[in-house]
Image: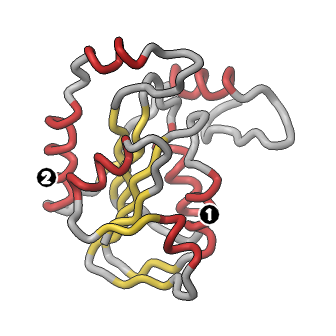
Amino acid sequence: MLFYFTGTGNSLYAAKHLDAERSSIPQVMRGPQLEFTADAIGIVCPVYGYEVPPMVRDFLHRAKFLTGYFYMVLTYGNRHGGAAELAQTLCQDCGIQPAYINVLLMADNWLPSFDMDEQKRLDKGVDAHLAQIAADIAARKRWIAPVTDADRTAHREFWPASAGCRRMPGST
């Protein structure tokens, strides 16, 4: 069972490669039932400002996932800024113990900063990385993508101190 949130199609592309049984988070959020049971339950979504998008955060807070294997795949285009660590903290805040969180480099489609023609020409190894992620999930690998101090710094620099800013675990 896989839930996805996509704005431009990158996360849907990844979701299609990971599970035949997938549901759109915005559609599921409109329904009356937010309790899900499966052997494995996953979330695929983009990284927005180095974090999980607000709708996905809301979904994680409101839904109940009954599974022995909860995983997330976070798509990004340039820098993930430690999104896996932030997602792990978010899951734990929601009472979810993630078994696996990985980040997936894809075309950066934030149009104010990136040329889509150039992004299309770059070989970011998406399909090979998706195959590895699918194999990890099938094997029920337990792993959270590592985060570096440089990732934490990128996140800190992107989100100046404000009321809405989340601090990276381990940051000062």
Kindly identify the amino acid type of the residue bearing the numbered disc 2. Answer: Ala
How many other residues sit within 10 Å of disc 2, few (<14), some (14-19) or many (≥20)?
few
Point 21% across, 47% down: residue: 133
First in residue order: circle 1 vs circle 2: 1
User: In this rendering, is residue 96 above or below 135?
Assistant: below
Picture residue at 14% right of the left edge, 45% below the top: 131
Q: Can you give x and y, in whole percent of width and height, for residue 35 in the image?
A: 48, 85
SS for callout 2: helix
Residues at marks 1 and 2, CA–CA distance in whole angstroms:
28 Å
Relative to 68, say whether 133 is above or below: above
Closest to the observer: 30 or 68?
Answer: 30
Residue at position x 30%, y 54% in the image: 15
| Res 60 → quadrant | bottom right
State left or right for residue 112 relative to residue 75: right
Residue at 55% across, 63% down? 92
Which of these two is toward me, 19 or 109?
Answer: 109
Residue 124 drawn at (x, y percent)? 25, 23
Q: Which residue has dot 2 on it?
A: 135
14 lies above or below 138: above
Q: Is residue 84 left or right of residue 99?
A: right
* Amino acid type at mark 1: Asp
Q: Where's residue 110, x and y in %?
A: 53, 26
Quadrant assignment for the C terminus: top right
Nearer-the-camera pick, 141 or 108: 108
Question: In the drawing, does residue 165 fall left or right of residue 57?
Answer: right
Residue 114 at x, y percent in the picture? 48, 16
**Residue 93 disc label:** 1
Q: Nearer the viewer, mark 1 or mark 2?
A: 2
